[in-house]
Image: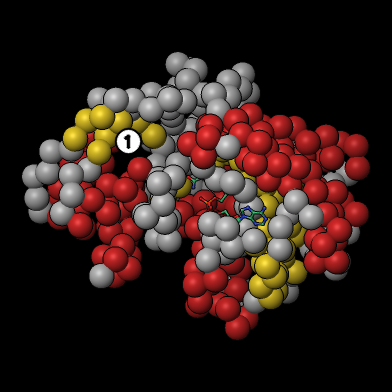
Amino acid sequence: MAFYVVTGGAGFIGSHTVEELVRRGESVRVLDDLSTGKKANLASVIDRIDLREGDIRDLEAMRPLFEGVDYVIHFAAASSVLRSIREPIETTEVNLMGTLNVLVAARDAQVKRMVMACTGAIYGDNPVLPRVETQMPDPLSPYAIVKLAGEYFGQVFNRLFGLEFVALRYFNIFGPRQNPLSQYSGVLSKFVRAYLTGNTPVIHGTGEQSRDFTYVANVVDATLRACHAPQGPGKVINVGTGKGTTLNHAIQILNQIFSVQVTPQHDPPRVGDFMHSTADITVARTILGYEPIVDFEEGLRRTVEWMRTTLA
Ligand code: NAD
């Protein structure tokens, strides 16, 4: 049994990761300030984990929580692109200074490895697809800038201090527990919510923009592989499905799932948004032995089922 600290473990992706770690019999401590995360997300495992409410901006409070820890999985972040545009200073404090604190605490506690949640948003609107890790980053929002800076810090800690560090660039993750009520929530959750509440789904732009929508179980699998893959340290690795799905196609699938013919409302494109994004997942396949296990349609069905129960 190994000992994991999961920062942001009460959030959407974090809680799925914690559940899987518990299922595998690992020992888990969650550090979360419960700002966007919820204790309820951890309901199924709450009596088998050590949940600590705390802020990654507070290094000294964090240090004791890292003692004796084997692996750190770092999800805690202000996780919205839109919010980062409205609140660039707070996003930078949490996502950059907070990440630096986690790196320092992990280094000083001599953990075996740290894996960090980064983002495909660092590639920006570069027309070259699919996104390969060696492509020049082109961050278009404060969120993407500071996530990229966090990657660089991690790689420098890997080189300078021998802290094993792996950065995973996640591409548009979706699934149960992604908050459909937040103004910052992912586009698929918003679509599903619109279907369930009898409202018209809203698309910003033509709907021909595409994303590499990745069901959360795939991300959990890649993340746990990254904790152990021998070739992982020092690497930056895309995590997606390798396939782009347009928003118009997502609407078609939802029309099938709900057996309706909804026509979406088209609003003007949003500031900071980009047209296409698909991950090249060759490195994940080679280094992590990763292969997506749940495809888009199945993931969407599971998300609809969860939201149906939750919103009821
Ligand atoms: P989320 O908002 O559900 O999870 C973030 C968690 O961090 C929450 O539980 C929140 O309470 C916690 N947190 C925020 N600020 C904190 C602080 N100062 N101290 C301690 N905890 C804090 O978001 P998510 O979608 O689960 O994202 C998890 C990670 O994956 C984030 O780092 C995000 O940037 C990254 N990511 C997500 C996506 C996606 O599509 N969801 C894509 C790329 C990257």
Residue indicated by mark 1: 245
| Name of the residue lying farthest toward the top | 127
For the residue pair 267 and 105, the one nearer the viewer reads as 267
For the residue pair 119 and 56, the one nearer the viewer reads as 56
Q: Is residue 223 visible?
A: yes
Q: Is residue 298 visible?
A: no
| Horizontal side of residue 206 vs 291, given as left or right | left
Q: How is the image coloured?
A: secondary structure
Q: Quadrant of the C terminus?
A: bottom left
Say which element carries label 1. strand
Instruction: Place residue 156 in its image quadrant.
Output: top right
| Horizontal side of residue 34 vs 229, given as left or right | left
Residue 269 at what x, y percent from top left?
Answer: 33, 25
Residue 170 at what x, y percent from top left?
Answer: 53, 42
| Horizontal side of residue 160 vs 17, given as left or right | right
Residue 230 at what x, y percent from top left?
Answer: 74, 48
| Horizontal side of residue 279 vs 50, given as left or right | left
The residue at 58%/37% (across/down) is 87
| Name of the residue lying farthest toward the bottom | 47
Q: Residues within 10 Å of mark 1 (few under 14, many from 20)?
A: some
Instruction: Place residue 137 in its image quadrant.
Output: top right
Q: Quadrant of the N terminus?
A: bottom right
Q: Please count the marks in the image.
A: 1
The residue at 27%/47% (across/down) is 191
Q: Is residue 262 above or below residue 206?
A: below
The residue at 49%/68% (across/down) is 41
Residue 284 at what x, y percent from top left?
Answer: 58, 41
Q: Is residue 120 above or below residue 22?
A: above
